[in-house]
Amino acid sequence: MRKVISVLVLAVMLLSLASCAGANDVVRLGVMSFANRANGLSNVQVDGIMDVFVRVLANSDSLAVIERDRLGAIAREHNLSMSGVVDPNMAVSVGRLAGCEYVLLGAVTRFNKSTKASGFGGLFAQVNTDVEVTIDVRVLDTKTGEVVLSVSETGRASKKASAVSIGGVKQAEDSAGGLEDDAIQDAVTKLGQRVLEATVGEYMQVLSGGSSEITLSVGAVAGAHNGSMYRVYAEGSEVLDMRGRVIGRKTKTIAIVQVTEVQNEFSMARVIKNGGNPSLIRRGDKISPISPSEAQSLIKKKEIATSRPMASSLEGGGDVDSRLSDIAGGQTYEPSAPEPEPDPSYSRSVGASSFGDRPAGLEDSSTNPERVIPTYSLAEGEKRSRITLHKNLQRAGKTRNAYNRYAEMYRTYSGDYLAAYQAGMIAQALGMRSEAAQWFDRALAANPNYVPAQDAKTSLESGRSGGRAPASTRRTKKRR
């Protein structure tokens, strides 16, 4: 019996450790109370914005939302006050105590409700009610205190109702109630996507395209519903600031689509406007929520592109999968052995490992994203996003999906020599030697002194000729 109890206790301990390890892989976002700075919305409606954020962000496996009540309890434990509008410094302190990497502060800054009636000459008419709600948010890094996202979005909702003239005054037969909540949902859906992009590098995307009906990666959990409209866009060349940092990418609107069928985690949509060629929409294209009036404006201004933007050397016909379909033969590969641990000899660093520090040069030896990616010429928010994506992909193993994701990351930023190296390692494991050599060359083009890529290329070439092990491997081998 004692042996059984011991086994059970050990099993519980292992499960607890596994649970803690899994939890550490999730980025935590603390959401504070929203301030009400607009006339016309009740405090109850504004307080409910946090709940809408939780629902919108719940579809992410990489982000956990810590709600206001939990943050308030932690603040009270440390004799901190969170009454009223929360000060940013206080928010960062409480978020850090709660184990959050980021905290979100927000306010409703504008509310507008307008009603227009038509048909004044007769007994019956139509009343159009339009509601707009503008919400501002800031996301702060609890480690550095810096603002990683500051953005404003306007949510819109409208309703048409029949009306009857009574004493010369139009009386709507249907209530316009609930439009405020619909507008809030619209704004938060847009903001939620921006938060995911800035904190964990997740985007809403096209899952399948090339026809009049496409599949989207957003479902009911993330706020999609029948009639929701989205802008489909493709990214083009990088935009550099005066210091050479990548601060964004040029985009082209490829199409406007409208949801026709919603599942929990995806939805079907029909194309209501494109540039005349359905094949322009490809798997992996990004999407963003759009209101009917915004869609109408894009169409009226003829801003729907008739061609895709040119991006980088990997840009070509087809989507991410089809561009790489000659590699791996369209199959999904699983690793035959566990992912090897990083070589401990790759420990030299010329920079710092924290997000807030700027290293003096490129990282020459490490395969740890937290050491390599801070050396890139990217905005801080983009660095964080890439670090999170790299960590998730390292856990995915040597699969075709991971290979495609690494290839896509390199396509969007050709300076990501770690992504090129990892793509090469997966290609080599899958037996695609020539492709692996190309990826190692891409990594070395971005950083000629990158030792892991040097050794991997040498090992690959030695394997063909039966040569010796890589020189740097022999050089860094520990003495017994």
Image (tube, helix red, strand yellow):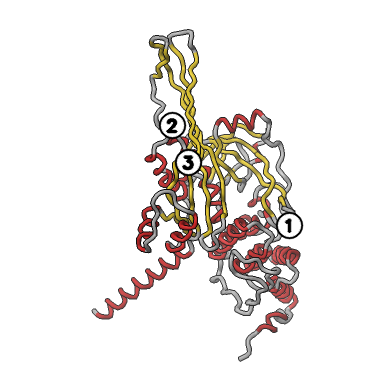
* Residue at point 57%, 40% (across, down): 214
In which quadrant is the C terminus drawn?
A: bottom right
CA distance separating discs 1 and 3: 35 Å
In which quadrant is the N terminus drawn?
A: bottom left
CA distance separating discs 2 and 3: 16 Å
Mark 3 nearby-residue class (10 Å; few <14, some 14–19, many ≥20): many
Q: Of marks 2 and 3, which one's residue comes earlier in the chain? A: 3
- Residue type at mark 1: give it: Arg
Mark seen at residue 108: 3
Q: Is residue 288 above or below residue 120?
A: below
Residue 474 is drawn in which quadrant? bottom right
Residue bearing the label numbered 1 = 243
**283 or 90, which lies in front?**
90
Q: Does residue 45 appear to the left or right of 280 in the view shown?
A: left
The spot of residue 384 in percent (x, y) is 58, 59
The spot of residue 37 in percent (x, y) is 47, 40
CA distance separating discs 1 and 2: 46 Å
Q: Is residue 237 visible?
A: yes
Mark 1 nearby-residue class (10 Å; few <14, some 14–19, many ≥20): few
